Amino acid sequence: MSYQSLLYEKRDGIGYVTINRPEKLNALNDQVMADLEACFESIAEDGEVKAVILTGSGEKAFVAGADIGVLATQTPVEGKERSIRGQRILDFIENLGKPVIAAVNGYALGGGCELACACTLRVAAENARFGQPEVKLGIIPGYAGTQRLPRLVGKGRAMELILAGEPITAQEAHRIGLANQVVPQRDLIAACEAVARKIMANGPAAVKLVMQAVNRGGEMTQEQGEFLEATLFGLCCATADMKEGTRAFLEKRPAKFAGK
Ligand code: COA
């Protein structure tokens, strides 16, 4: 599969998605969004891909935001439709059923920060900068930044990031829980691969169900979330992965999961 504004390849069970508009710091225009949607839909269907690493082309930016040239001319109706479409695509990435690791290799601003937040985990290069500068342009985040960021880092920190619009360093993002780890830029993809491989070594059915429990449970009361967890826990008990994982432990050997 090839895309106009993305590079895609898969190696050893990992899908590598690279947003490829380096001359515009990988800003998200309609073409990038359409390519992201098509690419993640095909990854969802591809049983060979167990995890995804999402990054931006070049050494300067993950994604420097939605394309401001496009934002500048949109009508209210177009703005609302673009926002709903972007939210839908990021929701799809968040609920892909496979871990998506954002390799944040530079600026993750506006829609770029929102895209990183929709990923399962974020690994930041030392030069990464996270921010929601929309208010400086007279707009608000439109790809669920006002919803996902407070859930990730807490309301007060999210309010400050979104209201002041000032970017923060990779270290600060790590301190507040926005970045899972910070590594030198040259080690970024290897660090993402190491995390992906750790997850991929575990029971795939359980990995998928954990993400459902956390993502869906986070939208429920604790009591409802616990009921969902118990139901998914019960579902795990019906899987071949559970039988293999528990038997392998008792037989003191590594598990060989079939993902069923
Ligand atoms: N939309 C459209 N184009 C963008 C962009 C965006 N969000 N971010 C960067 N670009 C373009 C620049 O216009 C420039 O294009 P040009 O060479 O045709 O003029 C190119 O990418 C390089 O950016 P430049 O500003 O020259 O790089 P820099 O290193 O001086 O600054 C940033 C980097 C990220 C600080 C700066 O580009 C910036 O502030 N971008 C906008 C960030 C933003 O507000 N994002 C939220 C949008 S809702």
Image (cartoon, rainbow, N blue to C red):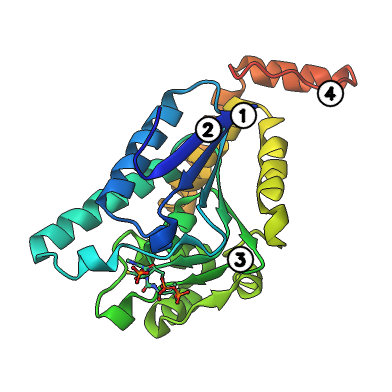
Q: Is residue 148 visible?
A: no
Query: Which residue appears at 61% of the width and 62% of the height?
Result: 179
Mark 4 → mark 2, Cα distance in angstroms: 35 Å
Mark 4 → mark 1, Cα distance in angstroms: 29 Å
Q: Is residue 170 visible?
A: yes
Q: Secondary structure at mark 4?
A: helix
Q: Say whether marks 2 and 1 touch (CB < 8 Å).
A: yes
- Residue 249 or residue 27, whichever sits in front: 27
Query: Which residue appears at 33% of the width and 75% of the height?
Result: 134
Q: Secondary structure at mark 1?
A: strand
The amino acid beneath tag 2 is: Glu
Q: Secondary structure at mark 3?
A: loop
Is the residue 176 above or below the residue 205 in the image? below
Disc 1 under 8 Å from ligand 1? The reply is no
Mark 3 → mark 4, Cα distance in angstroms: 33 Å
Closer to the eye: label 3 or 2: 2
The amino acid beneath tag 1 is: Arg
Closer to the eye: label 1 or 3: 1
Query: Which residue appears at 58% of the width and 26% of the height?
Result: 205
Q: Which residue is mark 3?
A: 177
Count neighbours of disc 3 (C-alpha within 10 A) and say few if under 14, some if 14 to 19, many if 20 or more. Answer: some
**Disc assigned to residue 11:** 1
Q: Residue 207's spot in the image, x, y percent? A: 60, 34
Dot 4 or dot 1, earlier in sequence: 1
Count neighbours of disc 4 (C-alpha within 10 A) and say few if under 14, some if 14 to 19, many if 20 or more. Answer: few
Dot 3 or dot 2, earlier in sequence: 2
Dot 4 or dot 2, earlier in sequence: 2
Q: Which residue is mark 4?
A: 249
